[in-house]
Structure formats: C-alpha cells, structure tokens
Image (cartoon, helix red, strand yellow):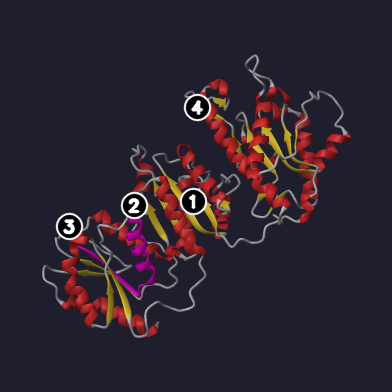
Amino acid sequence: MPQPATSADSNFVDEIFISYAHIDNDSLKQGLEGWITRFHHALEIRVAQVRGQPPKVFRDPKLQGNDVFGDVLVARLRKAALMVSVLSPGYIQSEWCSRELNEFCTTLNAAGRLVLGDHKARVFKIVKTAVPLASTPEVFQALIGYEFFQLDPKGRPRELDEIYGPEAEREFWARLNDLAYDIAELLNVLENPPETSGKPSVYLAETTSDLDGDRDAIRRDLQRHGYTVLPDRTLPLKLADLEAFLASEVARCKISVHLAGPVYGVVPEGTDESLTVIQNRIAREAGKAGRIVRLVWIKSGEGIQEARQRSFVEQARTDPGLDEGADVLEKSIEELKTELYNRLKAAELPPPEAAGPSAPGVTHVYLICVQGDQDALRPVADHLFQQGCEVTLPLFDKDAIDADLREDHEANLKSCDAVMIYYGQGSEAWQRAKMRELAGSAGLGRKAPFLAAGIMLGPPQTDAKQQFRSNDVVVMHMPDTFTSAVLDDFLSRLRSASKHA
C-alpha cells in the first residue's frame, strides 16, 4: 500500500541513481557522445533548473563485465532517493542491471517505501528502445514510463536522438522536460513531506497514440499547478481487472477528462469496447451518481474513418441522458484547459452555508435564449414575474468580452432556483449545448438540483422541435402567440418543489 513520505525518506546519499546497459552508451556516430552520457548531462541540468539546485546523480561509467557486485555500489543503491532505469533489449538481458533493480526495490520494499503517497513510485522507467512489456521486470509492468523512441512509417522503433533529425531532437527535449519535472516533484516530496493541499485529483483518461501530445500537455499543466493526475500506472488489459482498477481510480477524483479523436484505439481482452470507450463509461456511471464531473473533448476537424469511433463520438455529442456534471466540448485544447480549471476551481470551493441564493419567498428563474429571441420572451418573463418569480435573462452586451459574458451565464446557472431554455431562433447545436450546460451545472459549484428545469419550443417550428422529447426537463410547446397555459406544468413543478425545499 502506498505510504506518505516522511523525514526518513530524505536520508540519502544520491538523489538519482541511473541504471543502464553499457551497450546503450555506444555512439552510432563517431565523435558524438553516447546517448546515456547526453541523457545524464541533460537530465542533471534540467532538474537543477526546475528545482533551483543541482541534484546528486550517480551513474557508474565503468564497463563492469564480470566484476563482483561491489559493496560500495550496493551501499549507494541503498541510499539512493530514486532510480532511473533506461530500458532496452540490452537492459533486459543484463544481469548487472537486474541486480541493481532488485537491490534497490528489495531495500525499499522491506521498509514499505518503494511507492509513496498518490502512487508515486521511486523507480522511473525510461524506454529508450521498445521492448515487449511481458519481458520487462515485474516492477516495470505497472508503471506508465517515459518513451524515448518513436515508430517510423514501417512501425520500427527509432530512438529520440539528434542523429535522426531535428524532429526527433525536439521530441527528446520535450520528454526529458516532463521527466525532469516529475523527478523534481518526487524529490521535493521526499525532502519536504507535503501537507494535504485540498486540491482535487483529476482522472485524465488514457487515450490513443494520435492524442498523446494533447494528453501530455494537459497532464504537465495540471501537475505544475499542484494537482494529482491519475492514472499513473499502466492500465490492465483484461476487462474484469481493468474495470475494477478504473472504478477505484475514478473514485479518488473529482473531475475526469476524456479525449476523443479519429482513432478507436486498443481493445482489451474480453470485450469489443476500446479503452477510450470503457474509461468514459466508468466515469459516466460515477457522474450519474453525482460523484464526479466529466468533460469529454472531441478533436474538431478530424475525419473519422472507423464506424465504431464515429458511433462513440456521435453518442457523446447527442447523448440525451444528461448526466450530472457532464459536458462535451469541441474547442481548442487551450479552451479545454480553461474550462477544466474553471471546474477545478469550483470543486475547491467550500460548500455554501445557505441552502439557496434567493431571498425568502422569492424564486429566481433564469431564462436562457439567443439575442434574437428577447422580444418573444417578454410575455413569458412578464407572466413569471406576476407569479412571484424574479427573472433573469442572459447578458447581451456588444462591448463585453466573451469571457465576461460566459462568467455571467455560469454565475446565473449556479445561483438560480429554476431554469428555462427558450429554443426559438437558436440552432439545434445551440440547444444541445445549453441542455448539456444544465446537466453540467454541478461542475460550476452548484450544490442543489434545480427546483424546476424546462425547455420552451418556440417559433419557427421545425421537425427537430416537433420530435423533441426529454425525461430530464419540462417540455413546453409554444405557438406563435403566447398563452399563460404554456407555463402551467413548469409552474406546477416549481411550486411543488418550493414547498418541499
């Protein structure tokens, strides 16, 4: 079981012990230092820059051959804060590397200190060259790791090395930067065991390889803001094990983020659903129970060729279930981050002391519409006012910036007692987006359900409006001329809920 860091964990000689096969430091190009040497140098400098102080790094540069596993080396392993293991076929076949790993893990396991806090392992898996997961030592099989290789067009692994061109070199520095930040974070935890921050954990769903860059960008940003990001280990690939693991991970989080692109992805053993679909399903179940806020991001402008993925994306877009806290976004990755941090900020707020924002005896109704429907809504607003309701419409100000308009809209959703969407001149896409916002209001910090929620279908009449059905909101069909009877069901539900509030 993971243990919190204590002062005993800071009693080490070396902060970073680099374990590697010496064959991986043989240079492919005359006059160029070996890959391990360059990796060591870059990592040492980048960790120093991140932490503001140079780390103590040990790497045995001597070709060990059949040397006896020296007492000095054993002593250093036992006093190392963490191990960086550079995996490759040479590493897997090296008896020496195996003994280094076993010595380090055995020492820490005996004290229950190999994994700390929120599953922070003190072994970092660096994959220099692809190796089958089943052939790696058991301790590595649960770790996500850092891949320092890419697959070429023929599917062959190619190390991230400057000899393969500027793109490979850029990717090397990006992944080394991730590694340096994660090492710096763990060293800080070991040296200064943190108090509980109160920040919620985020489940950032594993995704397909084409979206790895987007997922890594979000993960880095969250971690640098002090959030714990899960999962931080390799997902099981047997369905029963996977579902149990996902349920436990999601239960630790307040928010989950799911990225969907054109690729369906890996299908675990025992199912025909992809990892992306399964993770979304598990989080959806938690969201329906009110335990988590779920954001689904669909990468726009991508052609989806596979029917299974088209079906999944379309279901995400049109899902009528409207789970608590769910939202589907088709925006830029930066806009997704903004939305995510807004939800996180709301999740960190303490619960309000009062049950509701309205004054005693006053019911606040928020009417949502597009600007062109303001005139059509006047008789609706007038009748609600005559029934004792305070009515608010969206802010339409040509001089206001979009962020201010959005903030006002979300504040109304959070504070109102009841809400109604007027679906007149707005598009069907607009209507669906607003329905999702109603369902996602818990993610804005709303603590109680709406006393009443409705949608009024006004002119112009369309087939989509005629066929509209919902079990989540009161549906009102308004003819060309408003009559108060249109609001009877909505007001009846509002009065009934107010009596029991």
Density class for disc 1 (Cα within 10 Å; few <14, some 14-19, many ≥20) is many
User: Residue 279, which numbered label?
Assistant: 1
Residue 465 seen anywhere in this rendered image of the structure? yes
- Of mark 3 and mark 2, the one earlier in the sequence is 2
- Of mark 1 and mark 2, the one earlier in the sequence is 1
The quadrant in which residue 483 appears is bottom left
- Of mark 4 and mark 2, the one earlier in the sequence is 4
Q: Which residues are magenta?
A: 402-424
Task: Mark 4 vs mark 2: give the one in front.
Answer: 4
Q: Position of residue 82 (x, y in %)?
A: 73, 43
Q: Position of residue 445 (x, y in %)?
A: 45, 66
Q: Residue at x 69, y 41 (%)?
A: 138
Indicate left or right for 215 with 484 as reference. Answer: right
Q: Secondary structure at mark 1?
A: helix
Q: Residue at x 53, y 32 (%)?
A: 171
Q: Residue at x 65, y 44 (%)?
A: 51
Indicate left or right for 472 with 94 as reference. Answer: left
Density class for disc 3 (Cα within 10 Å; few <14, some 14-19, many ≥20) is few
Q: Position of residue 9 (x, y in %)?
A: 77, 51
The residue where tag 3 is placed is: 463
Task: Mark 3 vs mark 4: give the one in front.
Answer: 4
Please state which of residues 302 and 343 is positioned toward the viewer in this rendering: 343
Q: Position of residue 3 (x, y in %)?
A: 71, 56
The residue where tag 2 is placed is: 317
**Mark-to-mark CA distance, 3 and 1:** 35 Å
Density class for disc 4 (Cα within 10 Å; few <14, some 14-19, many ≥20) is few
Disc 3 and disc 4 in contact, CB within 8 angstroms: no
User: Residue 425, which numbered label?
Assistant: none
Image quadrant in which the N terminus is located: bottom right
